[in-house]
C-alpha cells in the first residue's frame, strides 16, 4: 500500500521509525504542535490536506491524531479511506492502548504528561512543555487582556480561578518510548515539576499503536472512514465513530 500520514509533530520520532520499518510506502506530513488549542482551525487544516491528498494515488490516509479536543470530529473522507486511532489524544498513542490510558488516569488523575518530541520541538511561540496544557505565554496574554477589560483586581481574581485546576496536579510523568536521548528533556521536565512542587516520574511508553497505524494493522483500535463518511464522537470507550457525511 501507499499511505499518507497526517500527524502532529509530537509523534515525529516514533512515526519516522515506524515508517522506516513498515512494509508499505509511507509519506508523512507533520503539523505544528499545539494546533489542537483551536480545534476548529486544526480540523479545517486537516480537512484541506485530506481533500488534496485523496487525488494523489494513495491507498489510505492515516492520522497521527486522536480526537484531540474534538479537532477530528466532523472530518470527512473523500476518495480514499481515512484511518484514525480510537484515542482521546496523543497520550493514548504514547502509552500504547486505551486500556492503559484509562488505568493511568484512574490511578493517577493529577498528572502532567511530557514527551521527548513535544519538548524538543518548542518553537518559542509560547507552547507549554506539557502535553495538552496551556502555555505560560498564553496565560500572560490572557492576563493582560483581562487587565485591559476588567482592571487589575478583577484580572487577578479571574486568573486565580482559572489556575485553580493546577492545585489538583501532583505528578509529572515523562513518557519514554526508547527512541532518542531523553536526558535533556528529562531535566527540563524535572525542573518544571520541582517548580510546581510535583513528584516526577519516568513512564515507559509503547509504540504499538503508532506501529500498527503505519503497518496497516487497523482492526479494533482504529476507525476506518470510508469515502463519504465523517467522524462522530461516541462518548464511550470507542471514542469515535462514523456517520454519512
Image (spheres, helix red, strand yellow):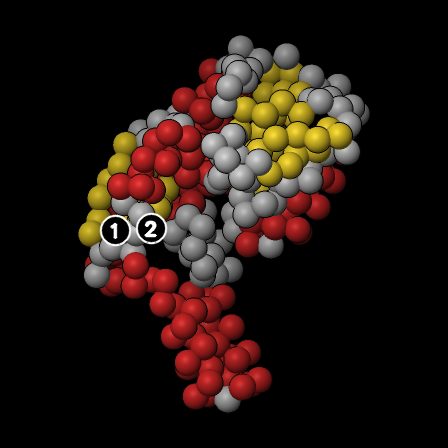
* Relative height, residue 46 to residue 206 (above, below): below
Q: Nearer the viewer, residue 213 or 222?
A: 222
* Relative height, residue 180 to residue 129 (above, below): above
| Left or right of residue 57: residue 212 | left
Q: Which mark is residue 112?
A: 2
Image coords of residue 139 (percent x, y):
46, 69
Report how far apart the C-alphas of labels 2 and 1 lie in the structure.
6 Å
Write the residue at 49% across / 39% down: 88
| Residue at which label 1 appears | 171
Q: Is residue 135 visible?
A: yes
Crowding at label 1, few (<14), some or many (≥20) Cα neighbours within 10 Å? some
Write the residue at 50% across / 23% down: 221
* Relative height, residue 169 to residue 94 (above, below): below
| Element under disc 1 | strand
Q: Which mark is residue 202?
A: none
| Left or right of residue 229: residue 32 | left
Image coords of residue 243 (percent x, y):
70, 31
Residues tagged 2 and 1 counted as in contact (Cβ below 8 A): yes
Q: For residue 45, which quarter of the picture?
A: top right
Q: Is residue 19 visible?
A: no
Image coords of residue 99 (percent x, y):
37, 29
Q: Nearer the viewer, residue 121 or 144?
A: 144
Write the residue at 41% across / 81% down: 156
Q: For residue 30, which quarter of the picture?
A: top right
Looking at the rendered image, the quarter that the C terminus falls into is top right
Looking at the rendered image, the quarter that the N terminus falls into is top right
Amino acid at each position: 500500500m501507499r499511505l499518507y500520514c497526517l500527524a502532529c509533530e509530537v509523534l515525529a520520532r516514533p512515526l519516522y521509525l515506524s515508517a522506516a520499518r513498515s512494509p508499505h510506502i509511507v509519506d508523512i506530513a507533520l503539523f505544528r504542535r499545539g494546533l489542537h488549542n483551536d480545534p476548529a482551525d486544526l480540523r479545517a487544516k486537516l480537512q484541506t490536506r485530506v481533500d488534496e491528498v485523496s487525488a494523489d494515488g494513495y491507498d489510505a490516509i492515516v492520522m497521527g491524531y486522536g480526537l484531540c479536543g474534538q479537532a477530528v470530529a466532523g472530518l470527512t473522507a473523500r476518495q480514499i479511506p481515512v484511518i484514525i486511532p480510537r484515542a482521546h489524544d496523543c497520550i493514548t498513542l504514547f502509552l500504547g492502548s486505551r486500556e492503559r490510558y484509562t488505568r493511568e488516569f484512574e490511578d493517577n488523575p493529577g498528572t502532567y504528561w511530557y514527551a521527548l518530541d513535544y519538548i524538543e520541538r518548542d518553537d518559542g511561540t509560547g507552547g507549554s512543555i506539557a502535553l495538552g496544557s496551556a502555555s505560560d505565554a498564553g496565560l500572560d496574554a490572557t492576563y493582560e487582556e483581562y487587565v485591559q477589560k476588567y482592571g487589575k483586581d478583577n484580572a487577578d481574581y479571574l486568573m486565580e480561578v482559572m489556575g485553580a485546576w493546577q492545585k489538583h496536579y501532583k505528578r509529572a510523568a515523562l513518557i519514554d518510548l526508547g527512541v532518542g536521548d531523553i536526558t535533556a528533556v528529562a531535566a527540563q521536565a524535572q525542573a518544571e515539576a520541582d517548580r510546581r512542587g510535583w513528584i516526577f516520574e519516568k513512564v515507559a511508553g509503547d509504540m504499538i499503536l503508532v506501529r500498527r497505524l503505519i503497518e496497516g494493522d487497523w482492526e479494533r483500535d482504529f476507525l476506518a472512514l470510508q469515502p463519504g463518511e465523517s467522524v462522530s464522537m461516541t462518548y464511550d470507550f470507542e471514542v469515535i465513530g462514523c456517520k454519512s457525511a
